[in-house]
């Protein structure tokens, strides 16, 4: 499949597929290897076709299935130094790493990949933009605060995967411990619906084709709430774009692109 498709999104595990004619990758592998294989098959991709895995950070919901893919299936893992150290500490072993430097663009196959810093409670977490065949895709979740760098890097994307994790009132009303609430609502936690809407309003442009709202909390958000609040943030500025939810338990609505038709 030539396209872009979240396979799982949320606190129970995150994994995204991105593929062109010649290069097929995953961003994160936070669900089991078996689940990744099954969900890839739903979009007509075989696990053996995956060339590499990009890792945003070393939390379990982003690397849970990485060991199986890296060792049993020999898929190389792209990560920065701090994330690689965290993975090694978790697995007590060392996958086949390809180390990138946060803030420096690198190429892999026909992809131009830029990892940039986000604010989250681990060492050197990143988000990514990926360019190929005239398209630019932004993948940005697991951040508690939108920095000017985040806004800058997500300009002029054709497709976006943006975190809309929670509704603050639902966090406050939840039975979760105070330490959880403080973490989620903090500057190194997760992005709220309204913050997602504000970010999207800043990076919207007429060429933006589709936005996935990602990493929704199962307890402190709902798809209807997220879509409503982010949608109203755009409407208030006279903007609109096609949006869908990236769910936890099922494969998302896939986006297929015709790279041959895109300007180089």
Image: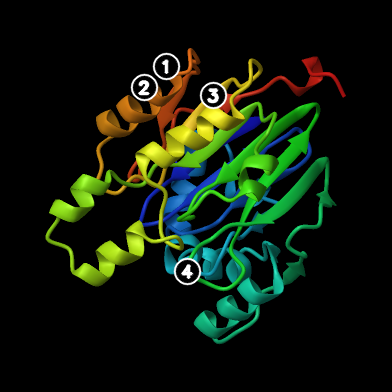
Is residue 27 among what the camera can see?
A: yes
Q: Position of residue 213 (x, y in %)?
A: 43, 36
Query: Dot 3 lies on which element?
Result: strand
Residues marked 1 and 2 touching at CB (< 8 Å): yes
Residues marked 4 and 3 touching at CB (< 8 Å): no
The mark lying in front, picked from 4 and 3, is: 4
Q: Name the residue that disc number 2 marks.
A: 232
Disc 4 versus disc 1: distance between alpha carbons?
32 Å
Q: Residue at x 53, y 81 (%)?
A: 91
Q: Residue at x 79, y 42 (%)?
A: 111
Looking at the image, tell me whether mark 2 or mark 4 is earlier in sequence order: 4
Q: Name the residue that disc number 3 marks.
A: 210
Query: Dot 1 lies on which element?
Result: helix
Residue 10, relative to residue 223: is it above or below? below
Q: Residue at x 45, y 66 (%)?
A: 64
Q: Position of residue 225 (x, y in %)?
A: 26, 32
Disc 1 versus disc 2: distance between alpha carbons?
5 Å
Q: Position of residue 179 (x, y in %)?
A: 26, 71
Disc 2 versus disc 4: distance between alpha carbons?
29 Å
Image side of residue 20 versus residue 160, left or right: right
Mark 4 nearby-residue class (10 Å; few <14, some 14–19, many ≥20): some
Query: Dot 4 lies on which element?
Result: loop
| Tag of residue 235 | 1
Query: Dot 2 lies on which element?
Result: helix
């Amino acid at each position: 499949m030539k396209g872009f498709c979240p396979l799982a999104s949320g606190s129970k595990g995150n994994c995204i597929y991105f593929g062109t004619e010649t290069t097929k990758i995953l961003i994160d592998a936070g669900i089991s290897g078996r689940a990744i294989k099954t969900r890839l098959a739903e979009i007509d991709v075989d696990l053996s076709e995956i060339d590499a895995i990009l890792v945003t950070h070393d939390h379990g919901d982003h690397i849970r299935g990485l060991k199986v893919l890296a060792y049993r299936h020999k898929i190389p893992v792209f990560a920065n130094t701090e994330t690689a150290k965290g993975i090694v500490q978790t697995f007590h072993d060392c996958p086949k790493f390809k180390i990138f430097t946060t803030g420096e663009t690198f190429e892999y196959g026909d992809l131009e990949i830029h990892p940039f810093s986000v604010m989250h409670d681990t060492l050197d977490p990143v988000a990514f933009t990926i360019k190929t065949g005239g398209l630019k895709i932004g993948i940005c979740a697991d951040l508690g605060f939108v920095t000017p760098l985040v806004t800058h890097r997500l300009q002029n994307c054709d497709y976006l995967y943006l975190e809309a994790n929670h509704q603050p009132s639902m966090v406050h009303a939840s039975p979760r411990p105070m330490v959880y609430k403080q973490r989620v609502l903090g500057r190194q936690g997760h992005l709220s619906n309204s913050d997602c809407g504000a970010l999207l309003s800043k990076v919207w442009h007429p060429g933006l084709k589709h936005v996935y709202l990602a990493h929704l909390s199962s307890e402190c958000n709902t798809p209807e709430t997220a879509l409503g609040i982010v949608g109203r943030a755009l409407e208030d500025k006279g903007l609109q774009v096609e949006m869908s939810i990236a769910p936890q338990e099922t494969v998302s609505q896939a986006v297929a692109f015709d790279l041959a038709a895109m300007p180089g």
